[in-house]
Image: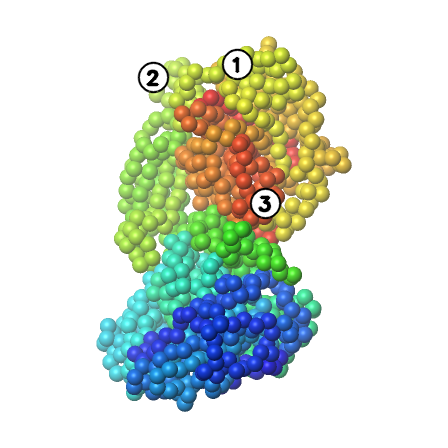
């Protein structure tokens, strides 16, 4: 079989819209007979209806055969897993033969076979007659079955080749997964309908017309029997992602009746601003591959719906269908629940970039038919969806003449939607200026209209009149992404910036019996890109990551500002007011709620003066929440949409307090710093019993409840065996650290293998304190840190002051600055007052609010598919780590510290490649940080912004330890 040709298919019927029709249909999904061969040159006798397939296996359709024990998945990001020699493919070409016998209902005549998706090349036979072949894996194909159908038993046979010339057009960043992975249907529907429904914001009226057979009716609008090509103008409510108003329409044709859901909306570009329904459109989007950890791209309907519900609940309003059209049911859900969609063609030739774009199909006229075929099939299938607001020519396919062919046809067929393409920065064939991973500085320059000019003045002027879309940004790989809020501030500041799409929605981790979730290389692929496929906002099981929680905060459609006792509520929606929300305020003192009251916020937003907050001691915070007042299709009443928080001023001393008032004010100040005031129990800690008193042994030092060995190392604390604390500069590298090069720089400097030299151990204050001077440094360099640990007893507690002085020329950022210690493993319950409940780093953690939180040590870990630094709680005032009976240790900051607690060391975490590699030990390893380096998005994009970098500079911090 010759698979090395440029023709995209044969025997197929003209592409048409995906429609709901009352024409009879027969779903052919289910169990098929299946045989896998290692090469393409297999006899075709299997297509004979009488062929004996009793020895074959069974395989569900839809599915991918590598996920059912036939061969193995393979992952590459850019690289083709075969030699770049278009249109040729390897002789070793896994080939799957499928057979499905079905009985034709009595009285059935005619019909067409519809395949929604097959990867990558499918030949089709019906009752031994070859109907044709198709390519374009994520696009539908229909064949005329009528002449070959017969009463009773029929046999459908399909041969699927993993590799074909079409594979050169499908080099998307994802698993290579062949098979019939979308629905197969025999249908008697033949009609095609194109509904046009625009909205005039000036008049509040919509204009409706359609192309196709029959007459159109919309009962709710009083439209009845509308003829093709005849426009009618009616009063309507517009469709938007925020208010997805749909009208049920019926097209009655001569042979069938079709039902559509029509949304009236208009997309336009004016003065370089992207508009929807006459208003600026700000895309708060994500890129979504179709993926399920057990089914690959054969995503169940319930999972599609779950994706959209999660997006809506996290304030996402747009999706780019990277990098191919999704299952058509997904777009139905976008229409219904409300998401703006950039529908992307099934085209990527990224691997040609590794050979200088030589022979790139995008610029080769021999591939013109194949590229245009893909664009045509997408547009025709999805043209009736109001959610689809842009057509994208594809992704990372370089530049070339065939893009102009695709764009020209698309504009002629559907002038109502702009065209998107990122791969050509001249935007010669696009209507929006699109980039991926542009830095904050470059995005700001584009927003201001002062970006670097193009060499061609005409193209430069054209591009400057375009809105800007960041089609990929904030690469969500592992811990992160950092810098989200900084991007959003720019998008909201400059009207030209239409927002963008975070990369990407989900980690593509395949369920694996040994690794938990697999990534590239776990199936023995000779060419792969490791865990670069693990780069999503949700984990493979669709549990939201901290990155998605941060994104929800950044994308909030309501903003709160606090000033002079007034709450300013800003409506950030583009197409609705705030009348669907309720506003609730709470006041907490040291994390304990002391007041709760509603706020009466005008529908348009504005200033609200809350009731006077109750007085009292402690650190008091006002939190205002916007929640749904009633059920929405995507969330129940009470769902939190947005929140804001501010610290209230400390209570003023009583006028008659005299000297005692000053003492009380000082006590309050100490509480803010996280220390217990004199004569008061530790705020928020467990009941403190009698402190454990131990007599020092020979060679040890005793300071309060601490026991130190001869080298000044703390070995016992309030009767508990401990190790440390001592200076720590290292963290288990994040994906951004590794791919961005920081981890290599840090490792070359030896920050992962610090040595600790003790220079002096001196009792001070008549034995009530201990001073330990050390030098901490890696081998083979003169870089180092002079570190002084000063211990002092204070009542039942123990105070540690750490002073750090860098030595040598430290030229770059460092991972962290803090101390690490080990506690007994039974202290597995953690309560803290600070930001939470989740992790937070200098440029992440927008979702973390100040409060009192509790969790087990195990629950404080973020289960990234590839283990790395995680779980840091920020701005902690105090924390207790306790075991059964409440006994343990309380740590307080002066004023705050960063807290990480885990059952394995940082070295263990760094060595792990998959979740099961992390085995709990018998100690709890606690990091108490002054600061950490920011996260950034350098795995693919800009690194940490300078404001979030951690430099080696003189520093001092203080911690207090008390028994709990």
Q: Which residue is mark 1?
A: 694
Tell me the crowding category of disc 1: few under 14, some 14 to 19, or many 20 or more residues within 10 angstroms, Cα based.
some
At mark 1, the secondary structure is loop
Q: Which residue is mark 2?
A: 656
Q: Which residue is mark 3?
A: 912
Q: Is residue 876 visible?
A: yes
- Residue 705 locus on image (x, y percent): 52, 17
Q: CA distance from mark 2 to mark 3?
A: 62 Å
Rendered image coloring scheme: rainbow
Tell me the crowding category of disc 3: few under 14, some 14 to 19, or many 20 or more residues within 10 angstroms, Cα based.
some
- Determine whether 213 is above or below 464 in the image: below
Looking at the image, is mark 1 or mark 3 earlier in the sequence?
1
Q: Nearer the viewer, residue 857 or 745?
A: 857
- Residue 322 locus on image (x, y percent): 50, 65
Q: CA distance from mark 2 to mark 1?
A: 45 Å
Residue placed furthest toward the bottom: 147
Instruction: Nearest to the eye among marks 2 and 3: give it.
Output: 3
Tell me the residue at 76%/36% (across/down). 780
């Amino acid at each position: 079989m010759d698979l090395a040709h440029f023709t995209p298919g044969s025997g197929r019927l003209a592409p048409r819209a995906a429609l709901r029709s009352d024409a009879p249909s027969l779903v052919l999904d289910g169990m098929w007979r299946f045989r896998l061969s290692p090469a393409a040159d297999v006899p075709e006798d299997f297509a004979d209806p009488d062929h004996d397939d009793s020895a074959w296996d069974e395989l569900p359709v839809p599915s991918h055969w590598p996920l059912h024990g036939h061969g193995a998945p393979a992952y590459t990001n850019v690289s083709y897993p075969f030699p770049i020699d278009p249109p040729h493919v390897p002789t070793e070409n896994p080939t799957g033969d499928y057979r499905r016998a079905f009985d034709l209902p009595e009285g059935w005549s005619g019909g067409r076979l519809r395949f929604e998706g097959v990867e990558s090349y499918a030949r089709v036979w019906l009752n031994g007659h070859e109907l044709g072949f198709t390519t374009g894996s994520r696009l539908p194909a229909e064949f005329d079955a009528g002449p070959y159908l017969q009463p009773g038993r029929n046999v459908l046979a399909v041969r699927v080749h993993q590799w074909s010339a079409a594979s050169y057009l499908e080099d998307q960043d994802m698993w290579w997964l062949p098979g019939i992975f979308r629905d197969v249907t025999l249908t008697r529907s033949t009609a095609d309908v194109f509904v046009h429904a625009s909205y005039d914001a000036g008049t509040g009226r919509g204009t409706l017309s359609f192309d196709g057979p029959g007459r159109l009716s919309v009962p709710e609008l009083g439209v009845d029997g509308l003829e093709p090509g005849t426009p009618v103008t009616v009063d309507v409510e517009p469709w938007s992602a925020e208010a997805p108003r749909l009208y049920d329409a019926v097209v009655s044709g001569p042979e069938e009746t079709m039902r559509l859901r029509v949304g009236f909306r208009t997309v336009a570009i004016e003065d370089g601003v992207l508009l929807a329904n006459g208003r600026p459109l700000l895309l708060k989007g994500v890129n979504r591959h179709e993926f399920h950890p057990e089914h690959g791209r054969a995503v169940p309907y319930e999972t599609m719906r779950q994706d959209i519900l999660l997006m809506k609940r996290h304030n996402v309003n747009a999706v780019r269908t990277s990098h191919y059209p999704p299952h058509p049911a997904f777009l139905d859900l976008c229409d219904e629940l409300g998401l703006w969609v950039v529908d992307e063609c099934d085209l990527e030739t990224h691997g040609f970039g590794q050979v200088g774009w030589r022979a790139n199909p995008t610029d080769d006229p021999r591939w013109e038919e194949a590229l245009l075929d893909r664009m045509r099939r997408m547009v025709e299938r999805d043209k009736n969806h109001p959610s689809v607001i842009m057509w994208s020519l594809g992704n990372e396919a370089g530049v070339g003449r065939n893009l102009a062919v695709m764009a020209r046809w698309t504009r002629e067929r559907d002038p109502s939607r702009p065209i998107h393409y990122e791969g050509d920065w001249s935007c010669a064939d696009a209507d929006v200026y699109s980039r991926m991973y542009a830095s904050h500085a470059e995005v700001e320059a584009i927003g201001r209209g002062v970006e670097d000019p193009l060499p061609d003045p005409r193209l430069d002027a054209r591009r400057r009149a375009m809105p800007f879309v960041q089609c990929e940004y904030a690469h969500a790989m592992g811990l992160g992404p950092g810098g989200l809020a900084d991007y959003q501030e720019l998008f909201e500041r400059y009207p030209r910036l239409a927002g963008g799409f975070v990369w990407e929605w989900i980690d593509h981790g395949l369920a694996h019996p040994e690794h938990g979730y697999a990534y590239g290389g776990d199936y023995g692929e000779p060419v792969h890109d490791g865990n670069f496929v693990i780069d999503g906002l949700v984990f493979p099981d669709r549990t939201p990551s901290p990155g998605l929680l941060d994104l929800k905060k950044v994308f909030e459609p309501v903003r709160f500002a606090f000033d002079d006792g007034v709450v300013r509520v800003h409506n950030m929606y583009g197409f609705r007011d705030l009348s669907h929300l309720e506003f609730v305020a709470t006041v907490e003192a040291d994390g304990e709620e002391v007041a709760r009251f509603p706020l009466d916020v005008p529908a348009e937003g504005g200033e609200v003066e809350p009731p006077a907050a109750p007085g009292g001691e402690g650190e008091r915070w006002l939190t205002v929440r916007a929640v749904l007042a009633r059920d929405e299709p995507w969330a129940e009443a009470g769902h939190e949409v947005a929140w804001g928080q501010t610290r209230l001023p400390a209570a003023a001393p009583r006028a008659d307090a005299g000297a005692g008032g000053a003492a009380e004010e000082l006590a309050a100040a100490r509480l803010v710093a996280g220390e217990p005031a004199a004569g008061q129990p530790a705020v928020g800690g467990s009941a403190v019993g009698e402190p454990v008193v131990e007599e020092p042994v020979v060679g040890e030092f005793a300071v309060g409840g601490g026991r130190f060995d001869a080298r000044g190392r703390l070995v016992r604390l309030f009767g508990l065996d401990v190790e440390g604390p001592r200076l720590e500069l290292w963290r288990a590298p994040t994906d951004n650290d590794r791919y961005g090069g920081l981890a290599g720089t840090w490792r070359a400097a030896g920050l992962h293998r610090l040595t600790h030299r003790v220079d002096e151990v001196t009792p001070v204050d008549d034995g009530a304190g201990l001073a330990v001077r050390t030098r901490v440094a890696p081998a083979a360099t003169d870089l180092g840190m002079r570190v002084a640990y000063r211990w002092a007893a204070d009542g039942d507690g123990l105070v540690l002051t750490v002073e750090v002085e860098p030595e040598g020329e430290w030229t770059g950022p460092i991972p962290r600055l803090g101390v690490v210690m080990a506690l007994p493993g039974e202290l597995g319950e953690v309560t803290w007052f600070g930001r939470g409940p989740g992790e937070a780093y200098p440029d992440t953690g927008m979702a973390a609010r100040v409060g009192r939180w509790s969790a087990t040590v195990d629950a404080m870990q973020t289960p990234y598919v590839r283990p790395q630094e995680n779980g840091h709680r920020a701005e902690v005032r105090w924390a207790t780590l306790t075991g059964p009976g409440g006994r343990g240790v309380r740590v307080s900051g002066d004023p705050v510290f960063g807290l990480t607690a885990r059952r394995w060391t940082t070295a263990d975490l760094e060595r792990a490649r998959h979740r099961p590699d992390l085995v709990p030990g018998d100690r709890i390893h606690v990091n108490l940080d002054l600061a950490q380096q920011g996260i950034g998005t350098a795995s693919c994009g800009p690194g940490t912004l300078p404001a979030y970098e951690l430099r080696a500079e003189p520093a001092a911090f203080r911690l207090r330890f008390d028994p709990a």
